[in-house]
Image (spheres, rainbow, N blue to C red):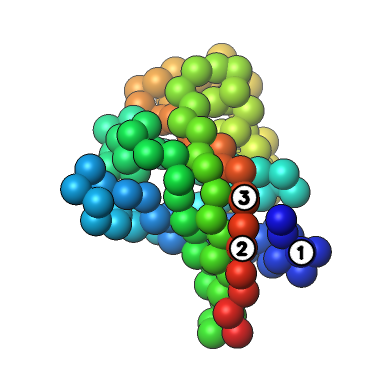
Amino acid sequence: MLTDAQRSFLREHHLAVLATGRSDGSPQVSTVMYDYDGTDIAISIKRYTAKWKNVLRQAKVGLVVNDGRRQLIVYGTAKAVDADPERMELTRRLFRRVSGSEPGPAEQLKPLLDKQERTALRIIPESAFTNE
């Protein structure tokens, strides 16, 4: 469970480091943009990336959000999303969070996501701790 302070910290930021597990057990880390809506964390990724393949194999992930010396580490389970309308919902949500505007109509966005092989992750936080 996240505390109110942890939920606020997640909402105030949108850049994090995502950690997934490679098939040999070693960690794979990537800087990602995210949106936290109070329930889950949305991340847009491409189908051919290591993080996508890693999540398909092992859904447990870690996410580190830094702000200077302060950081929040979130552990959770990721759901790999590659089908619409859920993929579109997560992408739109993330786009609004990061850009502050709407991404455009679905009939324009869907072909772009398909061409870029864009998918999404929906991460359900299970535990977190804060370092300061």
Asked if disc 2 and disc 1 are in contact, CB closer than 8 Å, the reply is yes
Asked if disc 3 and disc 2 are in contact, CB closer than 8 Å, the reply is yes
Report the side of 7 relative to 63 (left or right).
Answer: right
Residue under pointer 1? 3
Residue drawn where x is 32% and y is 40% of the image: 54
Number of the label disc, if any, that sits on residue 125 = 3
Residue under pointer 2? 128
Looking at the rendering, in which quadrant would you find the C terminus?
bottom right
Q: Nearer the viewer, residue 42 or 61?
A: 61
Q: Tell me the kind of residue under disc 1.
A: Thr
Q: Tell me which numbered mark, 1 or 3, is placed earlier along the sequence.
A: 1
Looking at the rendering, in which quadrant would you find the N terminus?
bottom right
Q: Is residue 82 visible?
A: yes
Report the side of 131 relative to 9 (left or right).
Answer: left
Q: Tell me the kind of residue under disc 3.
A: Pro
Mark 2–mark 1 Cα distance, whole angstroms, equals 9 Å
